[in-house]
Amino acid sequence: MVDKKAKTTILCVDDEQDILDSLHDTLMDTYNVRTAGKASDALRILGEEEISVVISDQRMPVMTGSELLAEINKIKPQIKKILLTGYSDINAAIDAINKGSVNRYLHKPWDDKALIETIEHLVSSYNDDMFADRMLAESKNIKAKIEQWKHHVESSDRFLDSCKMSICVLDKAEKIEYINKKGLEILKHSSVNDVKGRPVNDVFMVDDTSKKTFQALYEQGVVYNLLQARRSDGTTVQLQASLTFSEGSVSGVFFNMPSGLL
């Protein structure tokens, strides 16, 4: 049996207890299910716990489901949101989706299989978004500390090796200067000397076209994209990677295994 602490938490909001009971019974084996009978209770729970998906009925007193989900979107937009509607509320659901405050809507009475599949998809999407946020935060921290220690190579190497994210540092000619221990493990190299001085595209499969794609994403603030790399044993591996640029050239690669393979 899965430990409840390890389960993803889902919040269900409805002023009808029988609806909450039905949602709880349907989802409890897979998720940690929290319930709230009104919007104020839902917002309180959101302030106390990490919630991945919120399921809310549209018709509730004081605050409608679409209004509640719009408020949640302001507080933590990464949370995925499902609106339960009757057929007469379809326009409200479509309007909420168009405004970006709702990810999916389902008609009442819902189909359990469709509900479960929708939640699985949204939980996966939430996990990817949170991974991206962590990657961005650590990237910013790493970049700041690299700048701080750039004149202290030995100290910088120790710092880079302590990072949980894999890091490849390139020189101005886009040749590899350093890969930290985590990165060497993923690429199956025993020493940085195995790759030092090699062009970046000897290890990471980046051509001029993919560089332009990564640079465009970098300038748009997109954190990561998929990238293939060659391991020392001749196999290839798919990574989640972020390329950094300086004066039009690739200056570094931050990478990890995709979240599902970590």
Image (cartoon, rainbow, N blue to C red):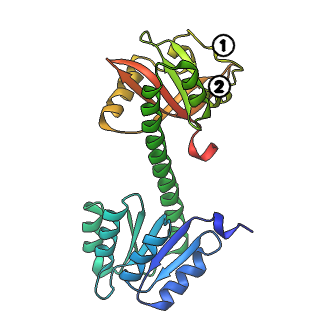
Q: What element carries label 2?
A: helix
Q: Can residue 215 be seen in this view?
A: yes
Residue at mark 1: 194
Mark 2: few/some/many CA within 10 Å (<14, 14-19, 20+): many
Q: Report which quarter residue 46 is drawn in.
A: bottom left
| Mark 1: few/some/many CA within 10 Å (<14, 14-19, 20+) | few
Tell me how far mark 2 sits from mark 1, CA to CA: 9 Å
Residue at the bottom extreme?
Answer: 17
Residue 169 % position (x, y): 50, 21
Residue 200: image x %, image y %?
A: 51, 16
Tag 1: amino acid: Asp
- Disc assigned to residue 262: none
Q: In which quarter of the image is residue 90?
A: bottom left
On screen, residue 31 versus residue 88, left or right, reads: right
Q: Which residue occupies 54% across, 74% down?
A: 112
Q: Which mark is residue 184?
A: 2
Check whether the beta carbons of the residues at disc 2 and disc 1 lie within 8 A of each other: yes
First along the sequence among labels 2 and 1: 2
Q: Where is residue 23 in the image (x, y as percent from the top left)?
A: 53, 80
